[in-house]
Amino acid sequence: MSLLDVNLKQEYRSPRDNIVNDFYIPLLKEANLYKRSVGFFSSSSLLEISYGITHLINNNGKIQLIASPHLSEEDIEAINKGYEAREDIVERALMQYITEPQNYFEEERLNLLANLIAQEKLDIKIAFSLKNERLGLYHEKLGLMYDKDGNIVAFSGSMNESENAFINNYEIVDVFTSWNDPERVSIKENAFNKLWDNDDTSAVIFDFPTVVKNKLLSYRKDSIDWEIDQKEFSAKHIDLTIEKLKTVTNSPEIPAGVTLHDYQKEAIENWSNNNYNGIFDMATGTGKTFTGLGAITRLYKDLKGKLAVVIVCPYQHLVNQWVEDIINFNIHPIIGHSSSEQKDFKQRIKMAIMDYNLGVRNFFCFVCTNGTFATEYIQSQINNIRGDVLLVVDEAHNFGAENLKKTLTDKFNYRLALSATLERHGDEEGTQALLDYFGKKCIEFTLEDAIKGKNGEKFLTPYQYHPVVVYLTDEELEEYHNLSKEIAKCIVKKNGKTKLSDKGKIIAQKRSRLVAGAFNKVTALAREIKPYKDDNHILVYCGATKIAEQDENGEDMRQIDAITELLGKGLKMNVAQFTSKEDSYTRDLLRRKFSDGDYLQVLVAIKCLDEGVNIPAIKTAFILASTTNPKEYIQRRGRVLRKYPGKEFAIIYDFITLPRPLDEAINLTYDEIKCEKSMVRNEVNRMIEFNRLAMSKMESDKLIYELTDTYRLNEDDNDEEEIDMEVNYYE
């Protein structure tokens, strides 16, 4: 028997799969060498690697383990500045996270590991990342199993197979084999071996401290329970565990090792002083979710442990991202949307509210999408709540829309809105409704604040900005002029305000799609992205539009399909689409493959990246979508600026759509300039905003000046700008 004989899947996900019984144990029965990196060192990480290793021991096998100490920012600074002996700091940190076993299983597993250390079959090394000669935290989860014949199984993923993980369904393991994917396995193996041999220039490896080793040895017993896996992970035990976890008391608390930044603490304090009502206006990537969870924790404690919480997000993937963080705050949420793993979430929320009203439970948390929240059933259940209830709305600008505004009722005596762009473009009434309901801004932490940083700490990466000029074709320009003339006929004055008729709204949308899908953008992208064809962590942002190029069925191609074909077939890049059509499972897989960087080079996306999707690995972005909405382009920029290991700065290519070359524009008549002015003004406004915070400005400054001068954008034309705003709202 060998690893070849194990029936493996490419992915395991709990609780759909029993990762221990279906993956670890069958493999370790055949393995004689186990290499593992576990991220942060702790008792729980040690217990994790012990699953199935009784079989490895019987095979006279060995384990190589790499971990990182869980250090505070102060500890890291002390090490880098030499304030204290490095060994002392590391030793103290490791000892802090060895906790006493809580039950028989933990006790026996520590005994198992202690025996392996004593027999020199378990070797542990400590890793730090190294960047610019400064040490940082190493955090990777990787495993390799070998058999006597040299076969290898590599795996990576979240891999925290605790009892809690089995219940909450957020543990994923990706699997690669040397016989099916030798290249990928070789990459994983080389990465681990370089670390182990201290031959990785981006990391430093230290020996495991003797004091900590002796602490682990203190758990050694004379005998080993060889049936520990069978006992702990039998079907009966898992069933009992599930029932036990169902009764776990929710008590929101900030996780160990997490320290909120000063600006986050200030936001929570201001919110508290405003009777727990208000708005967190925070730039994308600055920790809105953690600040929101910190606020929940604060209110729960201030109310002495009696609180109902409803968290609302626009999309399912955002709900899932929230849940990942919520669990870390010791909250076990009810998850409400059409694809929820909790198929009975309606019954769960009903029972939770009944228990809350009766005093059987003092806390519950319901996380759902905007759509689920607005349903008649959920609204009726919420109306049944008796007692304190907090409403947290993520991407709260969406609730300025008429269909969602009506759900903002007096039932919620505590309120918190989160948004990087609360102001609704072209909808002052909707914006004011949000301010009236949620209250004042408790913090305004801008993109500029995040890039420049505070107290020596930066929260987003700086970026280079490169405008890429694209001109409409003659046919597109002619159509643009014709549509503009039609729009002009549909502008009316109502109650002193400029408005578009319904017909005008349709035409405005058509003109917008024309600009967004400008044919020359595809050619320009091919030119600009070619130098990056061997790179990874690239995002191409398309418009939700078609181009004047036909597919095999003779129909106009979607821009995203044309781009995907160009990159994949034309430039031979590894590319995938990231859109609303992909289910949450696929999007999660794509995120991880993209961040890994070994295979997937490019994500081609449309609007689903606008709100909430966290892919910090993005380094280079090509933005083809010519949006006029500041909310959209500010959020798109923020997606690219999230910090990521090895990412010193980001690069943004913004495709600027112009009616014609400037040497032609200087000869236009006043009426011709007036017709094209709207398009140019929109593009210039976006350039000004992007250029304002960029690392280098000369390239953009020159273009902005030339366009402003040629199209007379500085002339007093308030009426025209008012019309533009109205049209842009519908575009």
Image (cartoon, rainbow, N blue to C red):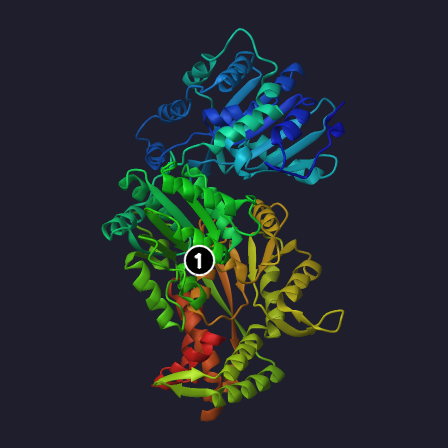
* Nearer to us in this view, 297 or 702: 297
The answer to whether residue 198 of the structure is visible from this angle is no
Give SS at disc 1: helix
* Nearer to us in this view, 144 or 11: 11
Quadrant location, the N terminus: top right
For the residue carrying disc 1, how many other residues have a C-alpha within 10 Å: few (<14), some (14-19), or many (20+)? many
Q: What type is the residue that disc 1 sits on?
A: Gly
Tell me the residue that label 1 is attached to. Answer: 638
**Above-or-below relation of 21 to 652:** above
Q: Which residue corresponds to the image point at 38% horizontal and 37% vertical from the top-left?
A: 361
Is 655 on the left-hand or right-hand side of 294?
right
Query: Where residue 517 sits: x, y (%)?
Result: 59, 73
Q: Which residue corresponds to the image point at 65% horizontal and 25% vertical from the top-left?
A: 25
Query: Where residue 111 sits: x, y (%)?
Result: 51, 14
**Above-or-below relation of 361 to 150:** below
**Above-or-below relation of 451 to 63:** below
Is 288 on the left-hand or right-hand side of 559?
left
* Nearer to us in this view, 436 or 657: 436
Quadrant of the rendered image containing residue 277: bottom left
Q: Residue furthest left?
A: 273
